[in-house]
Image: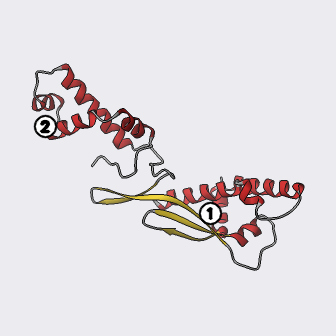
Amino acid sequence: MPAHDLEAAIILWVKSLLLDRRLVSGLIETDASALASLLQRASSIAAQLETHHGGRTLVGKLAHQVRVEDEQIAIDIDCNALRRVLGLQTQSEAAILTITTPAVRIRRGKDVKLVLANHDGDATERDPTLVALLGEARDVRDAALAAPDLSMKAIAVQMGEWRTRATRQMRIAWLAPEIVEAISEGRHPPRLTPA
C-alpha cells in the first residue's frame, strides 16, 4: 500500500471518529445545548479533513502512533489532543484511543502488497486483474461450449492462448456464482489473487 493511500485511510478513520456522536458525547458530561455545540464543532473539524493540508495537520496533532502490524493497522489517538482540538479541557491522565482495521499482506509474484480489508476480512475494493481473469475464463468456456468436439489444445490455439492457461481458465469459469459475485463486487478475501 503506497504511503499516500495509507494516509488517506487514516484521515478517513479520524473523520469517522469525529463524526461518531457517541464517542464525542462521551468526552464531556454536560447539558444538551453544550453537547449540541460540541457535536457541531466535531462535525466542522471533520469537514476540514477534506482539504489536503487540513487532514495532514489534524492527523499530525491527534495521532500518537500508527502501527502497521501483521494482520492490522492500528492508530493510537491521543484523547487529550482530541479534547484540545475540540476546545475542551484536557485531563490529567494520558488516555489513548486505538482504532484498528484489518490488513492483509498479499504476494503477487515477487511483490508483497498491503491491502486493507473490512471487518469481515474481505477486500475493500474490486481487483481489476481478478475481474479481467473472470472475463477471459468466460470467453474460454463459451468457446468450449460452442465447439464441444474440439480439444482444449485446439480451443487454446483458436483463442491464441497456451493450452495450460486455457485449461486453468476453464476451471475458473466454473466457479460458484457466489464467488464470482464477490469478486465482481470487491467482497472477495484479500488473499484471493490471480496466482
153 to the left or right of 190: left
Above or below, 120 relative to 3: above
Name which residue type carries label 2.
Answer: Arg
The quarter of the picture where residue 56 lies is bottom right
Q: Quadrant of the N terminus?
A: bottom left
The circle drawn on residue 130 is none
Position of residue 31 measured from the top left corner of the image (x, y, whole percent):
89, 58
Residue at (84%, 57%) from the top-left corner? 35
Q: CA distance from mark 2 to mark 1?
A: 51 Å
Residue 1 visible at all: no
In this view of the protein, which residue sits in the foreground, 140 or 192? 192
The circle drawn on residue 163 is 2
Above or below, 140 relative to 133: above
Q: Residues within 10 Å of mark 2 (few under 14, many from 20)?
A: some
147 to the left or right of 69: left
Q: Residues within 10 Å of mark 1 (few under 14, many from 20)?
A: some
112 to the left or right of 120: left
Position of residue 98 measured from the top left corner of the image (x, y, whole percent):
60, 66
In this view of the protein, which residue sits in the foreground, 55 or 178? 178
Position of residue 8 measured from the top left corner of the image (x, y, whole percent):
56, 56
Badge 2 marks a residue whose secondary structure is helix
Label 2 or label 1, whichever lies nearer to me, is 2
The quarter of the picture where residue 186 lies is top left
Sequence order check: which comes first, mark 2 or mark 1? 1
Badge 1 marks a residue whose secondary structure is helix
Name which residue type carries label 1.
Answer: Arg
The quarter of the picture where residue 78 lies is bottom right
Residue at (76%, 80%) from the top-left corner? 92
Dot 1 corresponds to which residue? 56
Residue at (40%, 48%) from the top-left corner? 189
